[in-house]
Amino acid sequence: AEGGTGAAPPEFSNHVGFPLTDALYIVHNTLVGAGVREKMKIICAGKVLSGFSLVRNFALGADVCNGARAFMFSLGCIQALKCDTGHCPTGVTSQDDALMDGLDPTLKSNRAYNFQRKTLEHAFHLIGAMGINNPVDLNPSQVMRRTSGGTHPRSYEEMYPPLKRGELIGMDTSAGGKHYLSLGQVQTAWLKGQRLLKSQPN
């Protein structure tokens, strides 16, 4: 979703691609609307740095969160943007013996472990503070975002109205219902998709 790895130029990572937070909910909502969400697993990645990152992504529909950049930081990465040169000053991505001495596996593996443990601990603290017993009970109405100059908080459920199961394909969700599709329903689904993409926060 984001514009590159931690080694990407800042202009790419900050401004290229589709922001994970928005893309994640659109993908989740689209799969629900297509009636296939329960058949899919959504794995997200992109600046997953903290316990709140996990809570937010799970609430917006992620089944799994992958983290890379934050773990690189825990190993000592300083984003020198020299990953591809072999001259990483911290030794994380270098094959140079002198530079590799800075990457002590015993010390750095312990740091990575502690980072992961504390990140999960903080995520569960947040979930508990929300009065929730299980991460699967998180939903978009519980995640707020400031819009309109940072003064008006709105939930992601307000910004991206949820679709009903099968709504995009005209699925009959009643007991024993069947799938059906008409030209009018295709047009309606297209318009709903357009509104969903345009409903970006101000």
Image (tube, rainbow, N blue to C red):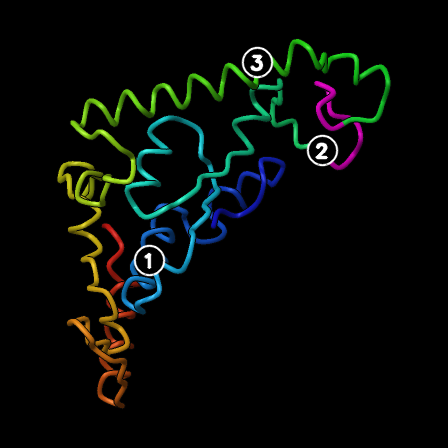
Dot 1 lies on which element? Answer: helix
Q: Residues within 10 Å of mark 3 (few under 14, many from 20)?
A: some
Residue shown at 59%/12% (left/top)?
A: 110
In the image, 192: left or right of 42? left
Image mark count: 3
Dot 2 lies on which element? Answer: helix
Location of residue 158 with respect to 192 vertically, above or below: above
Q: Residues within 10 Å of mark 2 (few under 14, many from 20)?
A: some
Tag of residue 14 = none
Q: Which residues are magenta?
A: 82-93
User: Does the magenta stretch mainly form a helix, a strand or a loop?
Assistant: loop
Residue at the disc numbered 1: 26
Q: Nearer the viewer, residue 194 or 32?
A: 32
The picture places residue 136, in percent across and down from the top left corner, at 28, 40
Tag of residue 83 = 2
The disc labelled 2 sits on which kind of residue? Cys
Q: What is the residue that sits farthest to the top in this orientation?
A: 107
The picture places residue 65, in percent across and down from the top left corner, at 45, 39
Question: Which badge, 3 or 2, comes first in the chain's sequence?
Answer: 2
Is residue 19 shown in magenta?
A: no
Which picture quadrant has residue 73?
top right
Q: Are marks 3 and 2 in contact (CB under 8 Å)?
A: no
Residue shown at 29%/62% (left/top)?
A: 32
The picture places residue 104, in percent across and down from the top left corner, at 72, 12
The disc labelled 1 sits on which kind of residue? Ile
Q: Estimate the spatial distance between the alpha carbons at disc 1 and disc 3, rounded to whole Å.
A: 35 Å
